[in-house]
Amino acid sequence: MRLATEEDVQALHALIEASVRGLQADDYTPAQIEGALGTVLGLDTQLIRDRTYFIVEIPDQNTKARIAAGCGGWSKRKTLFGADAGPGREPELLDPSTDAAKVRAIFVHPDFARQGLGSLILETVENEARAAGFRRFEMGSTLTGVPLYRLKGYVEIERIAVPLKNGEALPVVKMVKSAN
């Protein structure tokens, strides 16, 4: 795992799309997935610029190249979820003494699902946010992610129906956790 850079953007877009299409299909309709990709579900490059977004790479046995297997980050800004073109952008900085860090955009490639990468990414971003002075965490989770986040101590506080440009709405679950 390492900090993502601008050079990773193309690989991150491909990873996120594969993750959404491969792992969200049981919880969302095809129309919801199409409407959400690149807006509600996607990459926020501000996290890369803020140096709070990580990529997990796995060596490819055949080509010796590295494959993007997972990604995720945290934010010191008010935006709760979404890509660069997502709704509700709030770029203002948070106050670690009063605000919750935002856990953002954790995605795992379907080929590497259920192998602990999501947990590893979540632990890393929580530790990084804690090191920056945050004592609480908040996220807008997909329905698919809720079981993992509950297991990790997050509590559901609100369900949000995010309107999509194609007329659909995407259910997102706002969850919170206090740092230990």
Image (tube, rainbow, N blue to C red):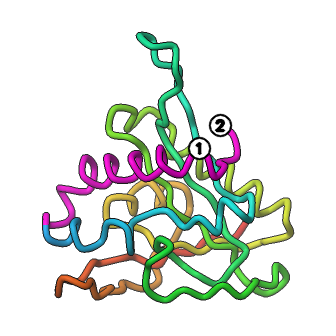
Within-10-Å neighbours for mark 2: few <14, some 14–19, many 20+: some
Tell me the residue at 49%/36% (across/down): 68
Q: Is residue 4 magenta?
A: yes
Tell me the residue at 19%/66% (across/down): 28
Given residues 89 and 101, the one toward you in this image is 89
Given residues 90 and 28, the one toward you in this image is 90
Q: What is the quadrant of the C terminus in the image?
A: bottom right
Specify the amino acid type for callout 2.
Met
Within-10-Å neighbours for mark 1: few <14, some 14–19, many 20+: many
Find residue 25 and report its horizontal and vertical position in percent. 19, 56
The answer to whether mark 1 and mark 2 are in CB contact below 8 A is yes
Would you say 17 lies left or right of 48 here? Answer: left
Given residues 31 and 23, the one toward you in this image is 31
**Quadrant hosting residue 108:** top left
**Quadrant hosting residue 130:** bottom right
Given residues 112 and 46, the one toward you in this image is 46
Magenta region, main secondary structure: helix
Question: Residue 55, which numbered label?
Answer: 1
Query: Secondary structure beneath disc 2?
Result: loop
Q: What is the quadrant of the N terminus in the image?
A: top right
Residue 57 to residue 80: above or below = above
Tell me the residue at 45%/13% (across/down): 63
Specify the amino acid type for callout 1.
Ile
Query: Secondary structure beneath disc 1?
Result: strand
Residue 1 to residue 126: above or below = above
Q: Outermost residue, left direction?
A: 30
Q: Earlier in the sequence, mark 1 or mark 2?
A: 2
Label 2 belongs to which residue? 1
Start-end of magenta stretch: 1-30
